[in-house]
Image: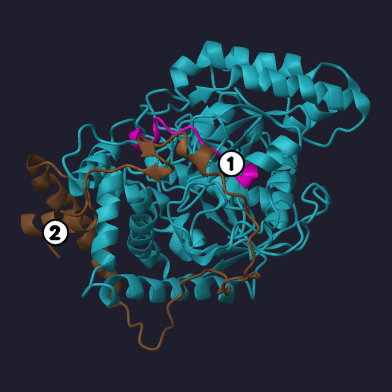
Amino acid sequence: MALAASDVEKIAHLARLGINPEDIPAYSRSLSEILAFVEQLNAVDTTGIEPLAHPLEAAQRLRPDSVTETNEREQFQRIAPQTAAGLYLVPQVIE
Amino acid sequence: MHRKSLVELAAGLREGAFSSVELTRACLGRISDLDSSLNSFITVTESQALAAATAADARLRSGGAGPLTGIPFAHKDIFCTRGVKTSCGSRMLDNFIAPYDATVTTRLQTAGAIMLGKTNMDEFAMGSSNETSFYGPAKNPWDVAAVPGGSSGGSAAAVAGRLAPAATGTDTGGSIRQPAALCGITGIKPTYGRVSRYGMIAFASSLDQGGVFARSAEDAAAMLAVMAGFDARDSTSVERPVEDYSAGLDASLEGLKIGLPREYFGAGLDAGVGAVIEAALGEFRRLGAVLTEISLPNTHLAVPAYYVVAPAECSSNLSRFDGVRFGYRAGSPKDIEDLYKRSRGEGFGAEVKRRIMIGTYALSAGYYDAYYLKAQQVRRLIRDDFLRAFEDVDVIMGPTTPTAAFRLGEKADDPVSMYLSDIYTIAVNLAGLPGMSIPAGFTAEMPVGLHLIGNYFEEGRLLHIGHRFQQATDWHARIPAGYE
C-alpha cells in the first residue's frame, strides 16, 4: 500500500503532527515500506478468529464509585507551560 | 566492589563489611569516570542517592533491612520519579519533572534500594538500538562503536559496564531481552500484568511490561521480587501473589522439557550466534534436561502483527502529549491547531512520528478492520501456538537475537531492518508470556544471549533455569575490557 504525499498530510493532520513539507517524501517512503511489510498479515485466513485485545483475556476490574483520590491540581500545574486561576491557558480555540 | 554480585553486596552490607554510602559513592565514582564513553545515564541523582544511602545505613544498623536495602540501581527514564526529570528519552519531556512516583519507583524506594539516576533509552521506548534518544545513543561497553540494543540501552550498558549492580527496564517487543543479549547480561520481562505499569510512561498498553537487568538470574530474582505484585492503580495489574523468586533456585533441572522451535533456527540466524546457542543447549542436556523440536508455525507473523498493534496503541497513548498541560510547548503558537502540531512535530523525533502515523492510519475509518482487527486476530493465532507448545514442554528456548550487536548507524535509516532485530522476542509480548535472556557465549568477541520463554506466571521457573545454567557456566561473569 503505497502512500502519496496527500495521504501522509491527511494522517499527520489526524494525529495533529506538524510535518515539514520537505520531509513528506521521506515519510511517504518509510510509511509505505512499513505498510508493505505488514501486508503479510492479509495472506492469513483469520475467518472466525476472535481478536485478542488483552494477552490474558482479562476483563476490566471495577471499583466502587467513591472518591478516593485527593485533588493535587496546584502541584500538577506547577509544571504547566501557562496557567491562570487553576486553568490551563492555550491560544484562542473558538472564534 | 563493582565486581561483586547484588546478592554478595547485600550480604556485605548486612555484615557491615562496607556501608551503603561507600557502595553508592563507588558506583557514582564509576559513573563519573566511565559514563562519558557509554552515555548510559541521562540524569545522575547524586545527592538524592547519598541521602538514601545514609538512610539505608541507619536501617541496616537498626535491623530493619530487607534484601535490597542499601543496594544501588539504575532506573530507566521511562519510570516517573517525583521531583526528578523524567524524559522518556524525548525532547517532548526534556523539561518534565515528574510530579509523582511510578509504583515501581515507590516499591524499590520502600525496599531501601538506592536510585543512582535515570538511564538513557530510545525515545518513548520505540527502538532497538538506543539511537532514537534525544540525548544521543548509548554505547555497548563490549565495543563502543556498537549499539547496546534498545529501547532500554542505557540500563543494559550501565549494568554490563558495572556502573550499577542492577537496573530497571521495560519491554514491549524485546526492549529488555534484546539489550541484555547484546550487552552480555541477564534481562527478564515477567508475565504481562505482573509488574505495575502505573507511572511507567505508556507506549503500547497491551504489550508494555516492566522488568529488570542484572548480572545474574539470582540477582534479577531479588529485584523482581520487590518490583512485582498487584497494584490497584494499574487496571491491568494481576491479583496473584508473588512467589519467592529466590527460593528453590538450586533445585535440579533433571527431566526439564525444553522446546526448540524449528522456526527460530532457520534462515536469518547468524551462524556464529547459532553455534553459541547449540553449545548452550548442550549444557542443558548435561544438566539433565530433555530437548525436543517443536513448531510455532505463526512465528513469521509476529513482527508484522506487532508493527500494527504497537503503533496503533502508541498513537493513542501519545495523544496526551499536546503542549497544553506539561512537557514541550512550541514557542508563540498562533492558534490551538498550531499549538498541537508544532509542539508535537518539534517535540517528537522521526521514529516516534513514523509510529504514530502508522498507528493513526491503522485505526482510521475504513482501515481499522483491515489492519488493527486483523493483527489482533493474528495475535490470537500466535498466542495459541505457544499454548499448544506448553502442553508438551516446560520452557521454550532459542537465540534472543538473530545477530550480535550491530554498529551504530548501521540500521538507523532502515526501519524494517531495525524491526527485524526483535524477531525472536516480539511474539512473547503479543502472547503476554514471561521471557528472559541470559548470556550464553560470544561470537566475534561480542555477547550472545540465550532466550527462554515460559508459560504464564512462570518467571520464577525461568530464573531457576537461568541460575542453574549460571552455576555451570561463567559467561555471565565476563566483564568488558576497560570496565574490569
For this orientation, the residue located farthest to the right is B63
- Residue B225 pos. (x, y %): 74, 47
Q: Is residue A48 above or below residue B391?
A: below
Q: Colour of chain A?
A: brown
Q: Position of residue B244 (x, y in %)?
A: 80, 52
What colour scheme governs how the chains and residues are painted in the rendered image of this protein?
A: by chain
Give the magenta range: B90-104
Query: Residue B147: which quarter of the image?
Result: top left
Q: Position of residue B113 (x, y in %)?
A: 72, 32
Q: Does the image show residue B127?
A: no
- Which quadrant is home to the C terminus of chain B? top right
The quadrant in which residue A38 appears is bottom left
The answer to whether A60 appears left or right of B120 in the picture is right
**Closer to viewer: mark 2 or mark 1:** 2
| Residue type, numbered disc 1 | Ala
Crowd around label 2: few <14 · some 14–19 · many ≥20 (10 Å)? some
The residue under the point 43% across, 26% down is: B139
* Residue B91 on the magenta span: yes
User: B423 or B354, which lies in front?
Assistant: B354
Q: Residue at 55% x, 67% y: name it.
A: B293
Q: Residue shown at 42%/66% (left/top)?
A: B299
Judging by the rendered image, the residue that carries numbered circle 2 is A10
In the rendered structure, the colour chosen for chain B is cyan
- Give yes or no for residue B95 being in the magenta stretch: yes
Q: Residues within 10 Å of mark 1 (few under 14, many from 20)?
A: many
Along the horizontal axis of the image, is A35 left or right of A57?
A: left
Q: Which residue is mark 1?
A: B440
Q: Residue A60 at x, y = what percent? A: 57, 72
The relative height of residue B432 versus residue B413 in the rendered view (above or below) is: below
Please state which of residues A24 and A12 is positioned toward the viewer in this rendering.
A12
Residue A18 vs residue A23, the one in the foreground: A18
